[in-house]
Image: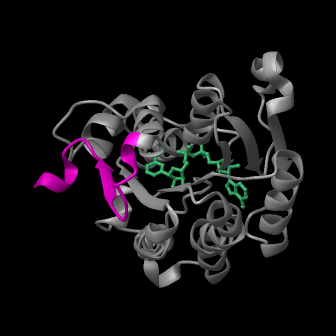
Amino acid sequence: MQQPTVLVTGAASGIGADLARAFFHTGHRLVLADLQSPNYMSEFSSRAEDVIFVQADLAQAAACNEVVRQGLDRFSSIDILINNAGFQHVCPLESFPVDVWDKMLAVMLTAPFLLTQLVWPSMKRSRWGRIVNIGSIHSQVASLNKVGYTTAKHGLIGLTKTAALEGGPLGITANAICPAYVRTPLVEKQIAAQAETLGISQQAVERDVFLKSAATGSLIAPAEISSLVLYLCSENAKSVTGASWNIDCGWTAQ
Ligand code: NAD
């Protein structure tokens, strides 16, 4: 039986790249979207016809439309939506640039909303759908100097819960995953910047800054996120909806 078709945003790097590989290796067809082209497409050559990449700036509504249009043209349905694209900007609230605020909300909140709207008719037709929003520990708690990111990620939980309520009768589930620090380029850039600011090694930043509130002792691997996503998209998770799944090294346990 044909596996469902998955749309992954932010697929070129980090968590999105791991998700693309995980879904490909479980036989899914893929619509990948990102600002930048993935450098791993050759890994999919055994079933190249099952994967398309759409270059898109998801801050633009027209680009969200284009991604879904191309996905539906190619595969007829989009059954799983993973809203994953995102970026970080660290700056005190008082001087946080309004244009960065607008972009953060556009990419990490408005795009997930628009893509949910756009794939909804396809999921409704199939009476089956899975939406997984990649939130963050910053969907639950704040950190200093991350007002745009924290606000967008908190908002994503509201979108997740509403989609779960409205999707339930249609066979569509919606969940959020809220990771603490995952070892990806997004975090590696922050570690390097902090090491420079604080004048300490990157290992010391990891241990004393990024893992300070963690009960477990290492950054999270992208594969830990992908395995929960695969579960949430499985048949066995059909009653799991509207939930926020923390993978946070015990951060919020205290
Ligand atoms: P990453 O920087 O490795 O990948 C993010 C991807 O999103 C990049 O490929 C980037 O090009 C893409 N992207 C950014 N803006 C875009 C736009 N306007 N249009 C299209 N694509 C865009 O980061 P990552 O760590 O893999 O992050 C993936 C998601 O996980 C993000 O939503 C992030 O907030 C979330 N997250 C990450 C961590 C972490 O510690 N790495 C923790 C919690 C949540």
Question: Which residue is nearer to you in this view: 53 or 116?
Answer: 116
Question: Which residue is nearer to you in this view: 20 or 198?
Answer: 20
Q: Residue at x 36, y 65 (%)?
A: 242
Q: Quadrant of residue 244?
A: bottom left
Please state the horizontal and vertical placement of residue 6, each as a whole percent of the image.
66, 45
Which quadrant is home to the C terminus? bottom left
Magenta segment? 236-254
Please state the horizontal and vertical placement of residue 34, each as a whole percent of the image.
75, 50
* Outermost residue to the left: 254
Question: Which residue is nearer to you in this view: 247 or 166?
Answer: 166
The colour scheme is one colour
Q: With respect to residue 229, does 151 lie above or below?
A: below
Which quadrant is home to the N terminus? top right
Numbered label tally: 0
Question: Relative to 137, is 163 on the left or the right?
Answer: right
Q: Does 248 lie within the magenta span?
A: yes
Please state the horizontal and vertical placement of residue 202, each as a whole percent of the image.
41, 33
* Outermost residue to the top: 46
Q: With respect to residue 231, does 130 lie above or below?
A: below
Q: Residue at x 70, y 62 (%)?
A: 122
Please state the horizontal and vertical placement of residue 226, each as a whole percent of the image.
48, 36
Q: Quadrant of residue 4?
A: top right
Q: Residue at x 34, y 55 (%)?
A: 239
Residue 42 seen anywhere in this rendered image of the structure? no
Q: Does 185 lie within the magenta span?
A: no
Residue 218 seen anywhere in this rendered image of the structure? yes
Q: With respect to residue 182, does 245 lie above or below?
A: below
Question: Relative to 52, is 24 on the left or the right?
Answer: left
Q: Residue at x 84, y 49 (%)?
A: 54
